[in-house]
C-alpha cells in the first residue's frame, strides 16, 4: 500500500511541474463531453486507452459493460451525465477476450456474477446459430463481445433518459466500440445512434 501512496505523490508532483494550475483548474470544473460505459477489467482503463485527462470523461464500469434497465447505479450515472453534465457522446466500450462474456458463453459458474451475466447468456442463445458456426472458441467469444456491445447500445438508447434527451433536441450520440487487449486498439462497431 505504501507504494501506491508514494506513486500518488510522485504523480501529483509531476502534474504540477508540467502545469502549476493543473489541480486548481481541474478541481473547479467538471465538463466532460463523454460518458464511458466499459468493463471493470483492469486492462481497459478508459482514460489511459483514449489518452484523455482527468475531467474529460465520466466513467461507469461493471463486469462485461452491461446496461441493465433495472440497474439503478448505471441509470443514475447515465441520468447525471445526460441531464446535468450534458455529455455529447455515450460510449459503450466492450473488449475482445472479455472474461465475463466468456463465462456466460461457456456456462462457467462463478457465483453471484452468474446472475449479473444472465443477459449475456440470453444473447448468446439468441445468436446460437451464428456463434456455433465459428470454429475457433476465442473468435466465438470475441463475436459475442461485439454482439453484446451492439445490444447494450440498443439498451442505452431505449432508456427514457436518452429518449427524452433526443426528444428535446439535445445533441447526443451513443456509440458502440470494442477494444483489443492484444493490440491496444479500439474498433468502432458502427452501431451509433443519434436520434429516436
Ligand atoms: Zn471484460
Image: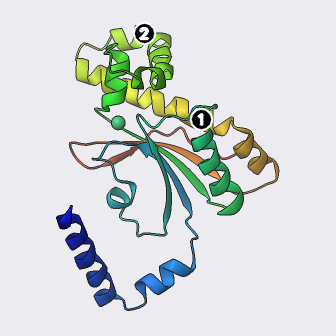
Asked if residue 193 can be seen in this view, the reply is: no
The disc placed on residue 128 is 2
| Quadrant where the C terminus is found in the figure | top right
Who is closer to the viewer here, 124 or 22?
Answer: 22
Above/below status of 194 relative to 70: below
In the rendered image, residue 132, in percent from the top left (x then y), is placed at 34, 9
Above/below status of 5 relative to 42: below
Q: Residue at x 27, y 23 (%)?
A: 139
In the rendered image, residue 170, in percent from the top left (x then y), is placed at 74, 57
The disc placed on residue 71 is 1
Instruction: For mark 1, give the secondary structure.
Output: loop
Q: Earlier in the sequence, mark 2 or mark 1?
A: 1
In the rendered image, residue 102, in percent from the top left (x then y), is placed at 31, 23
In the rendered image, residue 2, in percent from the top left (x then y), is placed at 19, 66
The image quarter in which residue 84 lies:
bottom right
Q: Residues within 10 Å of mark 1 (few under 14, many from 20)?
A: few
Above/below status of 127 relative to 20: above
Relative to residue 162, is residue 129 drawn left or right? left
Asked if residue 64 can be seen in this view, the reply is: yes
Residue at mark 1: C-beta within 8 A of ligand 1: no
Q: Residue at x 55, y 35 (%)?
A: 67
The disc placed on residue 41 is none
Who is closer to the viewer here, 34 or 7?
Answer: 7
How many numbered marks are there? 2
| Camera-nearest label, 2 or 1 | 1
Q: Quadrant of ligand 1?
A: top left
Relative to residue 188, is residue 73 drawn left or right? right
Q: Residue at x 40, y 70 (%)?
A: 53
Q: Residues within 10 Å of mark 2 (few under 14, many from 20)?
A: few
Amino acid at each position: 500500500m505504501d507504494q501506491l501512496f508514494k506513486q500518488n505523490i510522485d504523480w501529483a508532483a509531476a502534474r504540477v511541474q508540467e502545469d502549476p494550475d493543473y489541480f486548481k483548474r481541474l478541481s473547479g470544473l467538471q465538463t466532460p463531453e463523454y460518458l464511458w460505459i466499459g468493463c471493470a477489467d483492469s486492462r481497459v482503463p478508459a482514460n489511459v486507452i483514449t489518452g484523455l485527462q482527468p475531467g474529460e470523461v465520466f466513467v461507469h464500469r461493471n463486469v462485461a459493460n452491461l446496461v441493465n434497465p433495472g440497474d439503478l447505479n448505471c441509470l443514475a450515472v447515465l441520468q447525471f451525465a445526460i441531464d446535468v453534465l450534458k455529455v455529447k457522446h455515450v460510449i459503450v466500450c466492450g473488449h475482445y477476450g472479455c472474461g465475463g462474456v466468456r463465462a456466460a458463453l461457456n456456462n462457467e459458474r462463478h457465483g453471484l456474477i452468474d446472475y449479473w451475466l444472465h443477459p449475456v447468456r440470453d444473447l448468446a442463445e439468441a445468436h446460437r446459430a451464428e456463434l456455433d458456426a465459428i470454429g475457433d472458441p476465442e473468435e466465438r467469444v470475441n463475436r459475442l463481445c461485439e454482439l453484446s456491445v451492439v445490444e447494450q447500445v440498443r439498451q442505452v438508447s431505449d432508456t427514457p433518459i436518452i429518449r427524452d434527451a433526443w426528444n428535446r433536441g439535445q445533441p447526443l450520440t451513443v456509440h458502440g466500440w470494442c477494444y483489443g487487449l492484444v493490440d491496444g486498439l479500439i474498433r468502432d462497431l458502427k452501431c451509433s445512434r443519434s436520434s429516436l
